[in-house]
Image (cartoon, rainbow, N blue to C red):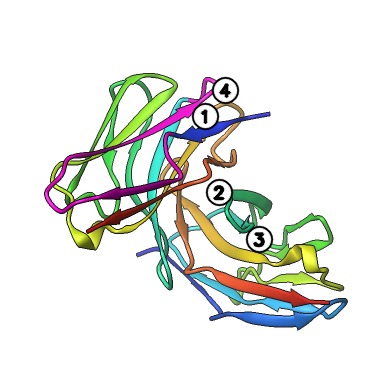
Amino acid sequence: GNSVTQMEGPVTLSEEAFLTINCTYTATGYPSLFWYVQYPGEGLQLLLKATKADDKGSNKGFEATYRKETTSFHLEKGSVQVSDSAVYFCALRYQGGKLIFGQGTELSVKP
Amino acid sequence: DVKVTQSSRYLVKRTGEKVFLECVQDMDHENMFWYRQDPGLGLRLIYFSYDVKMKEKGDIPEGYSVSREKKERFSLILESASTNQTSMYLCASRTTGTGEDNEQFFGPGTRLTVL
């Protein structure tokens, strides 16, 4: 079946550090992949997406590349800010518009 | 701006009570979803609705039902609340226009505690 696995958190970084949050998936076919972000006290917001192999999604300095050969969609940012502190969810789309989410990774950025 | 609103941010109920969680979206979206969010488990789909009066079970529908009588409103019902239904509940909506990769827009969530 379909599943998404993320690296466990929480992840604590200093401001301006490099961020990687790992995400791997299991799926039949070639699903579209997403990263959503949840800021404290809010619902989820779409951060970026990629719809086919080798696509790179990017937004707000975050990037992720759809790697079919490693079934991965790792999230990266070159220099994190305190305002990036949030929970990040990797997800894949299956059967129409439904999504399967990973377990979420909490990021805390210290000044 | 798309807006998805949920009737309560925090709710405390007693075991055995019937609980209604309401979700309203203002963008004429066809699809609506109910998830529960638990630490270490991410979001899990409870029910979704393709359109008015259409509903389908998600991955964890046991103990829940839904109602969608109007396009903008999607209600989640806990027929007899139990302590293991204590969780954060998130509603989302999505348009079907322009393809299947349209994003889901989420409400702020309702944190339900069942005592």
The crowd level at tag 3 (other Cα within 10 Å; few <14, some 14-19, many 20+) is some
Quick check: do tags 4 and 1 share a chain?
yes
Q: Residue B10 at what x, y percent from top left?
A: 41, 48
Q: Which mark is residue A25?
A: none
Q: CA distance from mark 2 to mark 3?
A: 28 Å
Identity, as a three-letter code, of the amino acid under mark 4? Met
Q: Do tag 2 and tag 3 residues touch (Cβ < 8 Å)?
A: no
* Chain that bears disc 3: A
What secondary structure is found at the residue carrying circle 3?
Answer: loop
Chain ID of residue with mark 2: A
- Identify residue type, mark 1: Thr
Mark 3: amino acid: Ala
**Closer to us: A3 or B11:** B11
Labels 1 and 3 touching (C-beta < 8 A): no
On the image, numbered disc 1 is attached to which residue? B96
Question: Residue drawn 57% across and 26% down?
Answer: B97
Q: Residue furthest top?
A: B70
Q: CA distance from mark 4 to mark 1?
A: 12 Å
| Residue at mark 4 | B27
Which residue is tagged 2? Answer: A43
Which is closer to the viewer, label 4 or label 2? 2
* Label 4 crowd bin: few (<14), some (14–19), many (20+), radius 10 Å: some
Q: Residue at x 86, y 73 (%)?
A: A78
Q: Nearer the viewer, mark 4 or mark 3?
A: 4
